[in-house]
Image (cartoon, grey):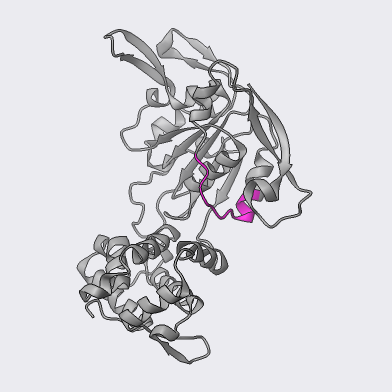
């Protein structure tokens, strides 16, 4: 159905690495019956900044033809799922997804009998079964939200060998070469340790954790990485347009050297650096970071939220024409409208402290 072709890692993932480093990429024979279905499950490649540490670990994990399950855990919004899907897109690996929750049952992974459009009863393979049969990845998101008894029921499947569809007459499924299980979670299965951010996460049996051949901790990107992502969000706006907006909002920010710049004299770098300072303060003052003060923010500014805020500022950059600040308006849509009233007030005061802008101009 496919062959593996070694290609330069720098070319495949767009990373500044040694050009002699290669990575196996699948190439499919599209004349084979059923390949179109597989191709339809390969995620769409989108602009993405790959993290070298996670790439290194996952490529090492992929050296096995049928690797043991992989667990990627970390705070919300750190790009766990997007990393898996964008890597799969570049390597041309199909992905079947499940999303764990409190009500999930084992049959949802493996399949069940359902009525088709003609009223006949047919068996529909679940994502685990399809990934095994077609040699793809089974991505289980939010696995720590599942009931512990259900995750224990997956132990045999996660061993990587054949498994039986007991509700389909005992059909035995032998995983095709290249199939693998990847789970994402906010915790490492020992329960919520963030003062209530992930209160629905369960403590899971040690036997479940033992099934993972590799466990990766995903954290927020560093300043340089998030700066690069913000630069991408604003790349289609000219310096003149940005400075017109800065002037219209009446921005006033302080540089690291202690000087203050205002309006049209604020550079693109000045602006992005101040966004990063603001997001760091929000993170430091959030429950997520371990802040136990009564006024700690119940939500934080994850990488995902930071980029949403940036994207919304672009979309609402004409807000000053209506007497509103695009910065504040965008922050409401990205973060503060999902916070308590007290936190919302504090977030917007903090925004004013960094950018010198009121919500209403």
- Residue at 47 percent across and 28 percent down: it is 154
Q: Is residue 334 left or right of residue 178?
A: left
Q: Which residues are magenta?
A: 44-55
> Magenta residues: mostly which secondary structure?
loop
| Any part of residue 31 in sight | yes
- Residue at 57 percent across and 49 percent down: it is 216
In terms of image quadrants, where is residue 240? bottom left
| Residue extending farthest right | 20
In terms of image quadrants, where is residue 321? bottom left
Q: Nearer the viewer, residue 140 or 307?
A: 307
| Any part of residue 299 in sight | no
Q: Nearer the viewer, residue 101 or 229?
A: 229
The question of residue 276 being in magenta is answered with no
Q: Position of residue 260 (x, y in %)?
A: 44, 90
Location of the C terminus by quadrant is: bottom left
Residue 199 vertical position relative to residue 226 in the rendered view, above or below: above
Location of the N terminus by quadrant is: top right
Q: Nearer the viewer, residue 216 or 149?
A: 216
């Amino acid at each position: 159905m496919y062959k593996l072709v070694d290609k330069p890692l720098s070319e495949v993932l767009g990373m500044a690495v040694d050009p002699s480093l290669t990575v196996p990429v699948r190439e499919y024979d599209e004349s084979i019956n059923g390949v179109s279905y597989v191709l339809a499950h390969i995620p769409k490649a989108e602009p993405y900044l790959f993290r070298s540490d996670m790439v290194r670990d996952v490529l090492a994990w992929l050296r096995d033809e049928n690797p043991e399950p992989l667990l990627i855990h970390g705070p919300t919004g750190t790009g766990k799922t997007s990393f898996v899907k964008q890597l799969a897109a570049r390597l041309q690996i199909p992905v079947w997804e499940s999303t764990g929750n409190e009500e999930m049952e084992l049959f949802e992974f493996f399949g069940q009998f359902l009525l088709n459009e003609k009223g006949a009863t047919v068996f529909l393979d679940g994502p685990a079964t399809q990934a095994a049969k077609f040699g793809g990845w089974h991505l289980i998101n939010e696995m720590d939200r599942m009931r512990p008894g259900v995750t224990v029921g997956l132990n045999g499947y996660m061993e990587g060998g054949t498994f039986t569809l007991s509700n389909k007459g005992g059909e035995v499924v032998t995983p095709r070469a290249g199939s693998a299980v990847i789970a994402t979670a906010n915790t490492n299965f020992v329960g919520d340790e963030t003062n209530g951010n992930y209160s629905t996460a369960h403590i899971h049996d040690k036997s479940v954790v033992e099934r993972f051949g590799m466990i990766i901790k995903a954290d927020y990107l560093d300043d340089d990485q998030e700066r690069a992502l913000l630069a991408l969000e604003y790349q289609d706006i000219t310096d003149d347009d940005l400075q017109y907006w800065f002037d219209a909002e009446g921005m006033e920010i302080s540089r690291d050297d202690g000087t203050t710049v205002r309006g049209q004299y604020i550079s693109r770098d000045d602006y992005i650096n101040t966004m990063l300072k603001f997001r760091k303060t929000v993170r430091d003052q959030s429950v997520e970071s371990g802040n136990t003060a009564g006024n700690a923010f119940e939500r934080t500014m994850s990488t995902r939220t930071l980029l949403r805020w940036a994207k919304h500022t672009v979309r609402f950059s004409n807000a000053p024409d209506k007497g509103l600040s695009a910065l504040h308006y965008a922050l409401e849509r990205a973060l503060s409208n999902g916070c308590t009233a007290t936190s919302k007030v504090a977030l917007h005061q903090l925004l004013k402290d960094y950018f010198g802008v009121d919500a209403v101009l």
